[in-house]
Amino acid sequence: MHQVNDAYLNTELFMQPISESQPIVPFIQGDGIGVDIMPVTIKVIDAAVDKAFNGEKQIQWQQVLAGESALSQGLDALPIETLETLKKASVVLKGPLATMMGDTSVNAAIRQALNLDLCRRNIHDFSGRASLLGRSSFPLRVVMRHNEEAMDLSFADQLGLGLQHEQAINDGLWVSHHYWSKIHTENLMKSALEYALLSDMPCLTLVHRAHLLPHTEGLFLQWAQDWLANNCDCRIDNQAWWLSKDQGSELKIQFLSVEAFLQQCLNQPNLSQLVVTYCRYGDAVSDVLAAQVGGIGVVPTAHLSASQAVFEPSHGTAPKHAGQDKANPTSLILAGEMLLRHLGWNQAADLVHLGVANAIEQRMLTMDLAKQVEGINPISCSEFGNAVIEFIRNH
Ligand code: NAP
């Protein structure tokens, strides 16, 4: 059976342990499959907290409206009351929200309003599943990115540059702008290095495309290396930079183009690593790694500032599966695990982790995973949740 012994699990950046026994935690149900996965996830988290703390601790869930649930009540997609509640919360659980073509993303608006600069995704292989590449399991990979850089011009807009993310030159010609800043690069490197050392990762990989855009993506690489050179005593050889850790081992720091990194994912799948990149490549890189362990249905996401954290699944609203009790709730359940660790409720978080691992090992698989393993009939979203809860109650 799985053991919860990975250092990364107990390494939450900007963790906010709480003394309250009944904290209020706002949640946004989410559009599409949010209606399926959110109730199941809340039941799993409640069962884990109840079991871990014998009823002495409890989350008081507070539903707030956003997306379709707000629009259907004649409100804005991100009502002001919701935003006010989110701004006061230290942690939030969020389902996926749809972005219609041309509309401002409610997801991005929440991240900007709460200054959630940092995004982290844990790509963990629950080894019961036969992997896509015929391997038994992959090591942990974690992807960390800055949320705004490169694709989003709100920061540049604040400087009054009058730039738009996408701008028409004429009917047949559009340009898109992206930007990169030294301060965001340095903050990202600082958080990444702190996380890599605390969680005892063997390797930190910075993924870039410096050769293509030397004055933006190239400077990302340069500023990152300058920051490391000024703040750490690294040994440099032909292959990589190396930083001594307290334990006597070394952290390998490598700088790879996105093409080289994607090849390495296939050629050296045994490498456990923290991958640091920017918004532009963050989703693509984490989705490729997710595909190796079953898909986006099993990868949780944390969006972090120094004082707040929003936890959500890595996938979107999967509208064609909405309301059918078929979607995989694992990504949101594991986001709930991250939330519990952020609060310092690790006993409950461990139970959630073990419950998911056990269900997957027992081949209790929702459709997305079942179709990757021969001879398995899929179970429903709620059946998966019940299997996790049963494990938690009997553990
Ligand atoms: P998606 O919702 O992630 O779905 C893509 C496909 O992935 C689905 O059709 C389904 O594949 C599979 N899938 C995703 N989640 C699953 C789950 N929990 N269980 C089982 N299968 C799952 O991506 P999309 O279709 O590109 O985006 C739909 C909407 O979501 C868009 O409006 C987008 O803007 C939004 N979105 C929101 C967020 C967020 O809230 N943070 C993130 C990404 C996208 P099969 O069809 O093969 O079954």
Image (cartoon, rainbow, N blue to C red):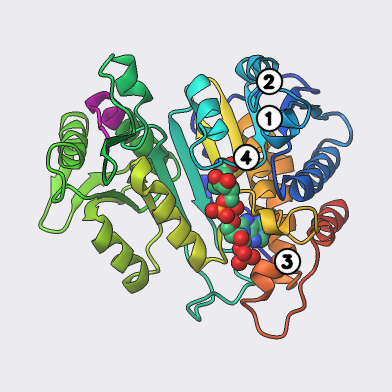
**Which is nearer the eye, 268 or 327?**
327
Q: Estimate the spatial distance between the alpha carbons at disc 3 and disc 2, rounded to whole Å.
A: 32 Å
- Any atom of ligand 1 within 8 Å of the CB at mark 3? yes
- Any atom of ligand 1 within 8 Å of the CB at mark 4? yes
Closer to the chain start, of discs 3 and 4, is 4
* Image quarter of residue 244: top left
Depicted 297 relative to depicted 292: above or below: above
The answer to whether the residues at label 4 and label 1 have Cβ atoms under 8 Å apart is yes
Q: Estimate the spatial distance between the alpha carbons at disc 1 and disc 2, rounded to whole Å.
A: 7 Å
Closer to the chain start, of discs 3 and 2, is 2
**Which is nearer the eye, 235 or 73?**
73
Using a 10 Å C-alpha cutoff, classify the residue at mark 1 as few (fewer than 14 neighbours), some (14 to 19) or many (20 or more).
many
Please name the residue that numbered disc 4 is placed on: 97
The answer to whether the residues at label 1 and label 2 have Cβ atoms under 8 Å apart is yes
Can you tell which mark lies on residue 366? 3
Q: Which region shows up in magenta? A: 175-186
Which quarter shows the N terminus?
bottom right
Please state which amino acid type lies under the numbered disc 2.
Thr
Closer to the chain start, of discs 2 and 4, is 2
Closer to the chain start, of discs 1 and 2, is 1
Please name the residue that numbered disc 1 is placed on: 66
Depicted 154 relative to depicted 271: above or below: above
Q: Nearer the viewer, mark 3 or mark 2?
A: 2
* Image quarter of residue 277: top left
The answer to whether the residues at label 2 and label 4 have Cβ atoms under 8 Å apart is no
Q: Nearer the viewer, mark 3 or mark 1?
A: 1
